[in-house]
Amino acid sequence: MSQRCKVSVVMPVWREAAGIEATLRLLQPLRAEGHELIVVDGGSDDDTAALAQRWCDRLLIAEPGRARQMNAGAKVACGEVLLFLHADTCLPDGALTQAAAVAAGQQVWGRFDVRLSGQRPLFRVIALLMNLRSRLTAIATGDQALFVRRSVFEALGGYAEIPLMEDVELSRRLRLASRPRCVRPPVITDSRRWEQQGAWRTILLMWRLRWRYWRGESPESLARAYRSDVRH
């Protein structure tokens, strides 16, 4: 790995042993192109870290919590652009070329449209509404693979280390610098959560949590509500 690269992909993981190798194997062509892949494990008690080691440029162990893990990865990254990718999300072809465009353009950050992996027609409607909402509000969620010029990310102090809504909170600050670059070729994110918890129930939960966040409720309180709902 050279001292400087165009894009650093930062992936926070926790208890991903079952699928981490398959996930990272798909990203190897990006490494071959000179981009960097950083995996940040949140202290998994399975073999996630050991299995990921050979498939990434840097493997870090950090305190659990996506915001903390992504900040830890960003701190050691060499790329001009940082792209934050969930372990259950796949990038489209040409993704890093799209992300790298914010290194020199007027837009300093961006995100991808999203598509859910399930085949139910409802999932297409959900994705359409997620993408439309994001375009209208200039707010991105973690499923949309947010990317940002590293200098801007550092100037803003990175992710707020909160247990929920960290991507929404960062987006609110980033949109003061520029509107996001909205990339249409979608990332594909696993629909497992929607299928297990029920699509309509998940929709209502996320909208309810987002509404409570906009009204000023603390992320800690929302995280407790989220965990309680998911368990039931």
Image (cartoon, rainbow, N blue to C red):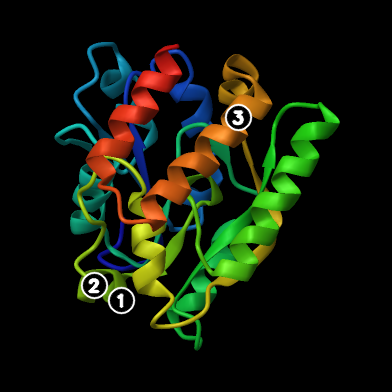
Q: Is 176 left or right of 202, judged from the image as shown?
A: left
Gap between marks 2 and 3 measured at Cα? 30 Å
Q: Residues within 10 Å of mark 3 (few under 14, many from 20)?
A: some
- The amino acid pointed to by label 3 is Asp
In which quarter of the view is residue 153 placed? bottom left
Give the CA distance from mark 1 to mark 3. 30 Å
Q: Which quarter of the figure is the C terminus placed in?
A: top left
Mark carried by residue 152: 1
Element at label 2 = loop
Q: Is residue 31 above or below residue 230?
A: below
Kind of residue sitting beneath label 1: Val
| Left or right of 41 on screen, residue 101 | right
Q: Which residue is mark 2?
A: 156
Query: Is 14 above or below relative to 176?
Result: above
Q: CA distance from mark 2 to mark 1?
A: 6 Å
Q: Nearer the viewer, residue 219 or 181?
A: 219
Horizontal and vertical percent for residue 103?
44, 78
Q: Residue at x 22, y 52 (%)?
A: 71
Res. 190 mark: 3
Say if 205 sits above or below 43 in the image.
below
